Image: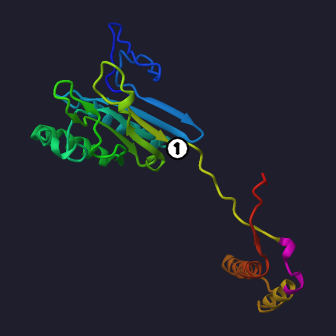
């Protein structure tokens, strides 16, 4: 993530050849549009947040969007995507800033930070960036602070491989440090269940035990009710399960099998 890169008079950003800009359609007219990536592993929605130091309108808009999306998902049974909130939240808190920047922890700043913290708790978001990791160098004082942050939803929290700053790759004309986030989106592997190995069954012993168990059943008679039928069926099924568990070994599927 490159926060607040240099923009020319056409509102186009200028970054080095090591970075690629990804814009959603009509991003100039609607800066709140989100980015999403989809694949066999699911969908990840990325929300790039910028809060002016005088308000937090974008996070309020984000909350309204998530509430609307949640209602739609409940009525359509749509899969829940993984969410990433990142950007310049422009708020400071001991939760992510270094202790020596206590002059930033004003009443208004802590109030705005608490709004972010409450919002992340409501939507089960986790802070991916390590606490105390600075993301901005002041142009005047050269002091480092942390106005930028990265939050990920509970669904993809365990898929985060790396979330760190890259000071050495900071572009020109910006005081924000680049943030790199690596996500493991490889599909989860399923373990095939073990199968019965019919080739190793001692059939003579199985037949003998099966006959012994069946001999203990009541004499065959006409079943006069559904309850009698269900009871007889459950008893017979229980015998089969015990015989199978006792005499039929399990085998692991070969790794080369399709």
Q: Is residue 241 above or below residue 13?
A: below
**Residue highlighted by disc 1:** 184
Alpha-carbon neighbours of circle 1 within 10 Å: few (<14), some, or many (≥20)? few
| Residue 140 covered by magenta stretch | no
Secondary structure of residue under mark 1: loop
State the image coordinates of residue 220 (x, y, percent, origin top left): 81, 87
Q: What is the basis of the colouring in this image? A: rainbow
Name the residue rendered at 58%, 44% in the picture.
186
Residue range of the region highlighted in magenta in the rendering: 198-205
Foreground residue among 41 and 143: 143
Name above or below for residue 225 compared with residue 216. above
Image quadrant occupied by the N terminus: top left
Count of labels in the image:
1
Residue furthest to the right in view is 204
The percent position of residue 226, horizontal first and vertical second, equals: 68, 76
**Image quadrant in which you'd find residue 101:** top left
**Residue 90 placement, left or right of 11:** left
Q: Where is residue 20 drawn, in percent x and y?
A: 47, 22
Residue at 43% across, 38% down: 181
Instruction: Tell whether 210 sits left or right of 36.
Output: right
- Residue farthest toward the top in the current orientation of the protein: 9
Name which residue lies at 79% across and 83% down. 222
- Please name the residue shown 21% across and 36% down the image: 91
Decide if residue 117 is on the left or right side of residue 236: left
Whole-percent x, y for residue 132 in the image: 27, 44
Q: Nearer the viewer, residue 33 or 183?
A: 183
Picture quarter containing residue 47? top left
Q: Does the magenta stretch mainly form a helix, a strand or a loop? A: helix
């Amino acid at each position: 993530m490159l926060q607040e890169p240099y923009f020319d008079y056409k509102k186009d950003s200028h970054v080095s050849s090591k970075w690629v800009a990804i814009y959603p359609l009509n991003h100039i007219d609607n800066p709140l549009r989100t980015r999403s990536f989809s694949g066999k592993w699911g969908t990840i929605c990325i929300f790039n947040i910028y809060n002016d130091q005088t308000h937090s309108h974008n996070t309020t808009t984000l909350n309204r969007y998530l509430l609307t999306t949640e209602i739609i998902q409940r009525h359509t049974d749509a899969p829940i995507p993984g969410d990433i909130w990142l950007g310049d939240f422009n708020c400071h808190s001991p939760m992510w800033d270094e202790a020596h920047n206590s002059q930033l922890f004003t009443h208004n700043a802590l109030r705005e930070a608490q709004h972010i913290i409450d919002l992340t708790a409501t939507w089960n978001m986790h802070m991916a960036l390590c606490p105390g990791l600075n993301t901005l160098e002041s142009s005047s004082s050269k002091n480092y602070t942390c106005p930028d942050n990265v939050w990920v939803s509970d669904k993809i929290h365990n898929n985060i491989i790396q979330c760190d700053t890259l000071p050495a790759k900071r572009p020109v004309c910006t005081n924000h440090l680049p943030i790199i986030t690596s996500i493991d989106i490889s599909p989860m592997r399923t373990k095939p269940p073990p199968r019965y190995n019919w080739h190793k069954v001692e059939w003579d012993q199985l037949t003998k035990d099966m006959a012994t168990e069946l001999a203990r059943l009541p004499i065959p008679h006409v079943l006069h009710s559904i309850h009698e039928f269900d009871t007889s069926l459950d008893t017979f099924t229980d015998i089969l399960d015990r015989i199978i568990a006792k005499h039929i070994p399990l085998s692991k599927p070969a790794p080369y099998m399709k």
